[in-house]
Amino acid sequence: VQLVESGGGLVQAGGSLRLSCAASGSIFSINAMAWYRQAPGKQRELVASITSSGSTNYADSVKGRFTISRDNAKNTVYLQMNSLKPEDTAVYHCNADITHSGCYNCRYWGQGTQVTVSS
């Protein structure tokens, strides 16, 4: 099982990016999925999460600007980021709680994708 992120890059303040994170392998089911971010010199923080039924949760700093969604048929979670600010600059990681033949509801992490917002 692995998670692969894509969609990061360099964008000007006020711009938008869409991150994707696809889970692959012999997966039975995926429970919660989430996006975290870590800026230089700071601790990793939760950005947004989504349950298997679609309930969402957001950090206060991104409410109204970011939207998390998922496509269960594709085992993929997305993060639509609008009105980006320089303080959103960070490495963004996805995670997912996955059940497969070797593990029940185990948490996996992607390798991270860099998002840089210029002022």
Image: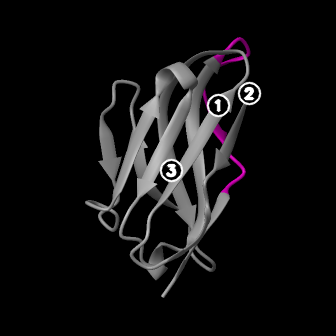
Which residue appears at 33% of the width and 30% of the height?
54
Per the rendering, the mark at residue 23 is 1
Q: Nearer the viewer, residue 102 or 18?
A: 18
Residue found at the very far bottom of the displayed protein? 119
Start and end of the magenta stretch? Answer: 100-112
Of marks 2 and 1, the one in the foreground: 1
**Residue 13 locus on image (x, y percent):** 44, 79
Compared to residue 107, the image places residue 63 above or below, namely: below
Cα gap from disc 1 to disc 3, whole angstroms: 13 Å
Q: Is residue 97 magenta?
A: no
Q: What residue would you read off at disc 3?
A: 35
Q: Position of residue 74 (x, y in %)?
A: 56, 24
Q: Position of residue 66 (x, y in %)?
A: 36, 57
- Residue 101: image quadrant is top right
Q: What's the amino acid at mark 3? A: Trp
Q: Give the distance between the C-alpha atoms of the residues marked 2 and 3, in whole angstroms.
A: 18 Å
The answer to whether the residue labelled 2 contacts the one labelled 3, judged by CB atoms less than 8 Å apart, is no
Left or right, 56 with reference to 28 = left
Residue occupied by mark 2: 1
Within 10 Å of the Cα at label 2, are there few (<14), some (14-19), or many (20+) other Cα atoms? few
Callout 1 amino acid:
Ala
Q: Residue 49's x, y, as percent?
A: 41, 44
Helix, strand or loop for disc 3: strand
